[in-house]
Image (cartoon, rainbow, N blue to C red):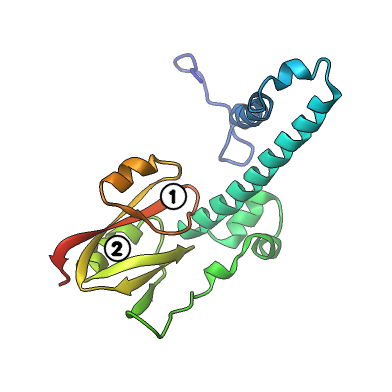
């Protein structure tokens, strides 16, 4: 949205999104619901079944919005934000936010006794995890799982490199370059790894 030079930016109510930004997100979600089922807008004028398609599309949007909210909260936790801060943003108490959105993935993951050695790297945030993974990758450790504030890594005799890309980045191109996606995703990030033909340090 372009503002005239010198125009003041509207103050966000929660300090993060302006009312105009909130309205834009709402409009884009509504547009996605109305645009995705083919010919839905036209059918709403004369076909009662179109309203059931509208309900089905709205349900999918609500489920996806709920999933994105959970992933965004996990990402915020991974960036080091507290449950107190998230509760205030969501309009609930710290305890309510943690009960509703906390996951078992915030606890230490299971390290298996069988197979190659595994370790949990924690606490890691969105701001330091890639530097840590760069060092660990040189020593043969590669990511096999992750969650808020941690990465689960496994030993190998080879060096590895790791990459974090925005959620929804073109996967096919990365895979043709030899990157393997680490199972799972934390909105807004997906993680990839690639083995190098170099012995671990």
Q: Which mark is residue 94?
A: none
Q: Specify the quadrant of the image occupied by residue 152.
A: bottom left
Categorize mark 1 by other alpha carbons within 10 Å: few (<14), some (14-19), many (20+). some
Q: Quadrant of residue 146?
A: bottom left
Instruction: State the mark number for residue 133.
Output: 2
Residue 10: % across, % down = 58, 27
Number of other residues with Cα within 10 Å of mark 2, as a class: few under 14, some 14 to 19, many 20 or more: many
Task: Say left or right for 125 vs 103.
Answer: left
Q: Identify the residue shown where x is 50% and y is 18%.
A: 7
In the rendered image of this protein, does residue 123 appear above or below residue 129? Answer: below
| Image spot of residue 157 (x, y percent) | 20, 73
Mark 2 lies on a secondary structure that is helix
| Left or right: 36 as drawn, with respect to 114 | right
Residue 89, compared with residue 61, is above or below; it is below
Task: Identify the secondary structure beneath mark 1.
Answer: strand
Q: Residue furthest bottom?
A: 113
Q: Farthest residue in the right direction? A: 48
Residue at x-position 42% and y-position 51%: 190
Name the quarter where the C terminus is drawn.
Answer: bottom left
Q: Along the polypeptide, which appears first: circle 1 or circle 2? A: 2
Q: Nearer the viewer, residue 104 or 124?
A: 104
Q: Position of residue 3 (x, y in %)?
A: 50, 17
Q: Which residue sits at x=41%, y=60%?
A: 125
Question: Count of labels shown?
Answer: 2
The residue identified by callout 1 is 189
Instruction: Report how far apart the C-alphas of labels 1 and 2 lie in the structure.
Output: 15 Å
Q: Position of residue 106 (x, y in %)?
A: 53, 68
Q: Give me the residue at 81% from left, 15% from top.
A: 45
Callout 1 touching callout 2 (CB < 8 Å): no
């Amino acid at each position: 949205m372009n503002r005239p030079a010198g125009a003041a930016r509207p103050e966000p109510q929660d300090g993060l999104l302006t009312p105009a930004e909130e309205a834009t997100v709402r409009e884009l979600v509504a547009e996605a619901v109305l645009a995705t089922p083919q010919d839905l807008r036209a059918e709403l004028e004369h076909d009662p079944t179109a309203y059931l398609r509208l309900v089905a599309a709205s349900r999918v949007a609500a489920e996806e919005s709920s999933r994105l909210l959970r992933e965004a909260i996990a990402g915020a936790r991974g960036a080091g934000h507290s449950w107190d801060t998230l509760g205030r943003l969501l309009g609930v108490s710290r305890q309510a936010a943690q009960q509703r959105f906390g996951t078992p993935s915030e606890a230490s993951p299971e390290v298996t006794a069988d197979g190659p050695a595994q370790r949990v790297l924690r606490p890691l945030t969105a701001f330091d995890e890639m530097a840590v993974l760069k060092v660990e990758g040189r020593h043969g450790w590669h990511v096999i799982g992750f969650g808020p504030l941690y990465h689960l890594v496994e030993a190998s005799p080879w060096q590895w490199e790791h990459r974090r890309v925005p959620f929804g980045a073109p996967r096919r191109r990365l895979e043709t370059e030899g990157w393997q996606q680490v199972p799972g995703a934390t909105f807004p990030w997906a993680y990839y790894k690639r083995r190098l033909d170099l012995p671990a340090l």
